[in-house]
Amino acid sequence: MKHSGLEEFLRATPVIDCNNPAVTAKARDLAAGAFGDVAVARNCFAFVRDEIRHSWDYQANPVTLSASQVLEHTTGYCFAKSHLLAALLRANKIPAGLCYQRLKNHGTVGPEFYLHGLNAVWLNEYGWYRADARGNRNDVHAEFTPPKECLAFVPQEPGEEDLTGIFSDPLPAVVDVLTKYTDYLQVRENLPDV
């Protein structure tokens, strides 16, 4: 299917390495038996949300950045998980980008505010649809229910916001943190902000 004007959201990059053999194999596997872009995208979303451990929730290393690293180690912060979801979707010829929220940190570790990474997926029937595969827990519940968004977090407090835009590549601050630090706790202590 032709996606005019959406080519940048289909390309492989060093971080969203949708041309990596392991990523393309997993993308094919997740698309098998699914009919249409919504069904394929839902399968990819559920896999990343449920089968890839959130680094902070599970206190898991190593720190991952690229989609192929996240897939190999089955762990990643929200940003890294969004990189894998984007890569799986792109490998299935579904345009996918990255979105960010600025959230208040209610924990005891890390900065007062931090960025949270999620995805925007181009669905032929609905257009851009935001989805958050960070992983559910008792206080976090995200689903893939287009056209209705069901995100992990909704910015409400002063200083919190949905950042404007859909990005084809991760923000440099995100890449910097996930490249610079080698331990999940170091990442948490130095989460990026805008």
Image (cartoon, rainbow, N blue to C red):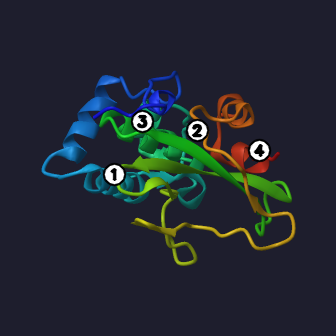
Count of number-bearing discs: 4
Please give the label number shown on residue 63: 2
**Pointer 2 or 1: first along the chain:** 1
Secondary element at image label 2 = loop
Looking at the rendered structure, the kind of residue marked 2 is Val
Dot placed on the residue nearer the N-terminal end, 4 or 3: 3
Distance from Cα at disc 4 to Cα at disc 1? 28 Å
| Badge 4 element | loop
Q: Earlier in the sequence, mark 4 or mark 2?
A: 2
Q: Which residue is mark 1?
A: 41
Circles 3 and 2: CB atoms closer than 8 Å: no
Of labels 2 and 1, the one closer to you: 1
Q: Amino acid at mark 3?
A: Ala
In the shown orientation, is residue 55 left or right of residue 105? Answer: left
Earlier along the polypeptide chain: callout 4 or callout 1? Answer: 1
- Tell me the SS state at disc 1: helix
